[in-house]
Every structure is written in structure tokens, then in C-alpha cells.
């Protein structure tokens, strides 16, 4: 009877019946899809290859999540460059304290090999910071024992001031098989400027040559500058037996001159050098105090022709102590200072570079131009920090120089910049930088860089004059949702 009634109802109102059947079918289909999605979510939630915890997962741009999970060819050499800097200065930085409660750096599925009793076994490794993982709610359930940060974890997340300097500022050795290894050089560079901005000192503590073998040594180079006057250069060469450096820390000793990282992260800088003509001496005894969070973590280039690196452990710093020239001493108290660290093979390489304070902001800019390069000039790299640390990176396409100054370089008149400007915008961020040059010093590079012990190394550079400038930097723009402006003293370099 029920079947007959249903059949008669369908034949009596066929279109209404079709509509009801269609609606029923759509409902069943939607339910199937929802159940499938729920099942997929449950499966992924149980997937051991997916890292849990937290509200946001941050991955490098362009990384395919499925490749990361399955270990495809694109994930073989996956890594996050400068991950410590990303953690400390971006995600866990004071600037984001109102939005970010906890950050947990993690890496999963790293291929390692364990060797025991002469047999190697491939294993998949997981790297985490225990306390950080716990803070984002992703700590594993322990069967027994404890799982807490050890010394290495603390070093990664929040190193002491001294540990941070050693991490950024340690020395290196040239890679085996690199060309022109005899021109390898590595050095600590410091500068300090007087309160009236009329006097300043350049100091370099250099280890140069093939440090893997016998042909190497050290040099202390100190240049005394007074605005509008000729430079006074002092140097001291030391054989390798009198040079001590480390690939695990920043301390270096060259004869009786030393750079030492103190337990609180300050640098004790002590140096002695003699005049270029063998008469007169300069002694330096300074303590350089880096401003917290004002550092550049470093960058490196690696090719057969060009292997080099650069880091700025003290982009903004203050120096106190004395600099004595021929027995006459000048006292510095919390004077503007700067420190960077360079290493590699730089023969015939040129660059544009500068670092300056600009009110509450500090800027670093630069680009490296390889020798004999026919490619277009690379864009500038501009790095900006404030009291909270890293603020922004911009990439201006060019720097525009106005060569309205003329200086004497080894008996030749050379036109050098009187002003430089560069501008860039990224999204809502914009920045304009103007450099007004107040003093310029030129070095003829045909015979190498004397400040790095390259005397007698004949250069084939197309722009053979190395120009070091002191001046004023003015910045204006809009960064991180607010206007920025500032003005202050800086040092700049280029070639002519």
C-alpha cells in the first residue's frame, strides 16, 4: 500500500517530486563532503609530520607544505637562514610584544646519520627549544624524566651579551681550494668620533694571508683624522707567531694589541702603532659599548673568485677611553662609535657602503660589486634599526652621487662626492636618505689597500681610488606605520 501511494504521488506531481529528489541529493552530497573534510582534518591533526601548537605557523616564502611533509626533492636542503636573528629580532622582538605571547622555533624531518659500531643508520631528527615549545602548547607527553632548556637552547633564544658578540664576531678560515688564498684577510674595524665631530679615528685589527698554512701575519692600522686636514697613518706589522685568533670567539691578539670581549658584552680595544715613516706612535685604550639590539647579523658570499663575509656586531655604540698620539692624549666619554667585522678575498672588489646615526635611528647601507662584472649594478641594501632593534630593510635601485668635491690622491686630482641620495618604497614603507659629505680621504688602490696589508698587490680595478667620507645623514619617510625622520653623523665609502 505504501509503495502504491508513493508511486501515485510521484505521477500526480512529477515536477515537485523531481525538485524534492534533487534537494535530497544535494543535501546528501554536502553531508558527504563535510564528513570527508572532517576526516581529513582529523587525519592531519594526528599527522606526526605536522608541527602543532601556537596560533600562527611561519614558513619561508615559496615553501610547499606538502613538499615539507613528504620530503620531496624541493625539501632536501631546506633551511632558514639566520633563524636566530628571525627569532630574536623579528618574531620575539619587543616591537611585537603586544601581539606575540610566545615563539617556538622548530625543525622537523631533518635527515641525519647515526654511526655506531661501524654501521651508519639514516634517522629523522626533530629540533625544538623545550620551554618555547611548551609555551605555545605543543609540548609532547613525557613517559618519564624531564624536558627543559639546556645551555645550547638558552644560547639560541637569549644569549648573554658576551655570547652574542662571540656568535656574530668570531674569526674564520679560508675555504680549502679557493683561488687567491694569499689575499685572504679578516679584520675587526672600529671608529670613534669626537663630540664636536671634528676629529675621528679609524682602527683595524687585521689577520691576513693563508692562515691555513705558513704565509700569514697580522697588522694593526690606525688612521687619525681631523676635518679639513691630511690623514695621519700609523701601522704595526706582526708575524704569525705573534698573532692569536679563534674561530669560536671574537678575541684577537696582534703583538701587544688586543680586542677582547668583556663578560658584559663590551669590547676592550687596546692598540699600538707607529708612523708610516717610522716616527711617532699612537696608542688606543678604549671600551666600546654596543647599544642593545642594534646589530646586523651578517651576510656572506661564496664563489671561487669571491668568498667574503660581513657582520656588524655594534651598529650603534659608544666609546670611552683615551687615544694618545705622540704622547698627547684625547679623552673620549660615551663618544659615537661603530664596529664591524669583515673576512674573505676582496681583491679588485668595489662597493658602496655607509653607516650613520640619524636621531633615534641608525642606518646601514651597501652593495658589493664583483671584479670585472658586466652585469647591471645590484640594488643597495638598506638596513634600519631603532631602540627596539631591527625596523626595516629596503632595496633602492641606485644611489645618486653629486661629485662636486676635488681632493688630491697620490698627487692626482680626483672628483669625489659632495652629496648622495637614495630613495625606496616597499608597500606602505618609504625612506629617503641624503648624505652631505663634509670631509673625504682618497687612497690609490693601484698598489693595494695599505690598511689591510696589501702593499705591492697591483690592482687592475677600473675605479682605482678608494674614497672614505665623513658627513651628515638625513632620513625622512614612513616605516612600520609611522613617520620617521632624523639627522646625524656617519661614515661612507665608494670608489672613483
Image: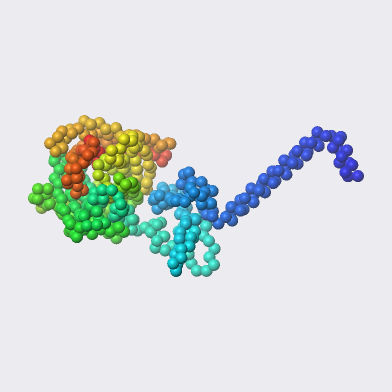
Residue at 28% x, 43% y is 355
Residue at 45% x, 50% y is 78
Residue at 40% x, 61% y is 152
Q: Residue furthest left?
A: 279
The reply, left or right, for residue 14 in relation to residue 259 is right
Residue at 25% x, 38% y is 494
Tally of numbered discs:
0
Residue 392 place in picture, x, y as percent: 38, 42
Q: Where the N terminus falls, by quadrant?
A: top right
Residue 176 place in picture, x, y as percent: 31, 53
In this picture, is 462 found above or below 145?
A: above
Q: Where the C terminus falls, by quadrant?
A: top left
Q: Residue furthest right?
A: 1
377, 50: nearer the viewer = 377
The reply, left or right, for residue 81 in relation to residue 417 is right
Colour mapping used in the image: rainbow
Residue 62 place in picture, x, y as percent: 48, 44
Name the quadrant containing residue 226: top left
251, 219: nearer the viewer = 219
In this picture, is 315 found above or below 395?
A: below
Answer whether residue 269 is visible to the viewer in this image.
Answer: no
Answer whether residue 234 is visible to the viewer in this image.
Answer: yes
Residue 333 place in picture, x, y as percent: 21, 51
In this picture, is 81 found above or below 19?
A: below
Amino acid at each position: 500500500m505504501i509503495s502504491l501511494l508513493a508511486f501515485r504521488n510521484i505521477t500526480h506531481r512529477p515536477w515537485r517530486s523531481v525538485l524534492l529528489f534533487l534537494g535530497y541529493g544535494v543535501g546528501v552530497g554536502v553531508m558527504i563532503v563535510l564528513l570527508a573534510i572532517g576526516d581529513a582534518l582529523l587525519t592531519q591533526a594526528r599527522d606526526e609530520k605536522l608541527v602543532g601548537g601556537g596560533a600562527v605557523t611561519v614558513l619561508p616564502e615559496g615553501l610547499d607544505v606538502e613538499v615539507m611533509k613528504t620530503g620531496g626533492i624541493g625539501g632536501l636542503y631546506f633551511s632558514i637562514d639566520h633563524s636566530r636573528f628571525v627569532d630574536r629580532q623579528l618574531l620575539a622582538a619587543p616591537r611585537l610584544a603586544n601581539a606575540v605571547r610566545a615563539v617556538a622555533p622548530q625543525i622537523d624531518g631533518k635527515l641525519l646519520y647515526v654511526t655506531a659500531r661501524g654501521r651508519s643508520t639514516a634517522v629523522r631528527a626533530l629540533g625544538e627549544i623545550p620551554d618555547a615549545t611548551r609555551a605555545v602548547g605543543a609540548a609532547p607527553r613525557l613517559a618519564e624524566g624531564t624536558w627543559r632548556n639546556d645551555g645550547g637552547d638558552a644560547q639560541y633564544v637569549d644569549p648573554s651579551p658576551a655570547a652574542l658578540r662571540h656568535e656574530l664576531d668570531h674569526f674564520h678560515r679560508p675555504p680549502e681550494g679557493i683561488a687567491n688564498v694569499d689575499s685572504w684577510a679578516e679584520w675587526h674595524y672600529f671608529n670613534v668620533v669626537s663630540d664636536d665631530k671634528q676629529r675621528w679615528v679609524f682602527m683595524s685589527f687585521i689577520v691576513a694571508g693563508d692562515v691555513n698554512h705558513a704565509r700569514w701575519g697580522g697588522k694593526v692600522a690606525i688612521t687619525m683624522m681631523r676635518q679639513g686636514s691630511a690623514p695621519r697613518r700609523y701601522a704595526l706589522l706582526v708575524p704569525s707567531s705573534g698573532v692569536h685568533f679563534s674561530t669560536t670567539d671574537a678575541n684577537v691578539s696582534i703583538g701587544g694589541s688586543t680586542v677582547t670581549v668583556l663578560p658584559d658584552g663590551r669590547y676592550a680595544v687596546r692598540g699600538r702603532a707607529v708612523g708610516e715613516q717610522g716616527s711617532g706612535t699612537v696608542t688606543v685604550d678604549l671600551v666600546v659599548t654596543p647599544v642593545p639590539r642594534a646589530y646586523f647579523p651578517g651576510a656572506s658570499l661564496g664563489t671561487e673568485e669571491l668568498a667574503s663575509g660581513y657582520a656588524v656586531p655594534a651598529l650603534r655604540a659608544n666609546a670611552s677611553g683615551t687615544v694618545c698620539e705622540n704622547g698627547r692624549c684625547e679623552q673620549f666619554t660615551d663618544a659615537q662609535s661603530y664596529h664591524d667585522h669583515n673576512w674573505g678575498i676582496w681583491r679588485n672588489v668595489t662597493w658602496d657602503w655607509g653607516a650613520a646615526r640619524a636621531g633615534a635611528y641608525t642606518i646601514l647601507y651597501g652593495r658589493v660589486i664583483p671584479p670585472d662584472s658586466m652585469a647591471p649594478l645590484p640594488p643597495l641594501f638598506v638596513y634600519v634599526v631603532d631602540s627596539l632593534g631591527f625596523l626595516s630593510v629596503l632595496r633602492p635601485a641606485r644611489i645618486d652621487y653629486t661629485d662636486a668635491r676635488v681632493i688630491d690622491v697620490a698627487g692626482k686630482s680626483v672628483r669625489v662626492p659632495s652629496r648622495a641620495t637614495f630613495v625606496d618604497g616597499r608597500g606602505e614603507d618609504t625612506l629617503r636618505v641624503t648624505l652631505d659629505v663634509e670631509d673625504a680621504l682618497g687612497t690609490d688602490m693601484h698598489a693595494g689597500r695599505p690598511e689591510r696589508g696589501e702593499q705591492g698587490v697591483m690592482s687592475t680595478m677600473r675605479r682605482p681610488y678608494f674614497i672614505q667620507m665623513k658627513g651628515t645623514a638625513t632620513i625622512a619617510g614612513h616605516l612600520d606605520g609611522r613617520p620617521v625622520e632624523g639627522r646625524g653623523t656617519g661614515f661612507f665609502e665608494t670608489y672613483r
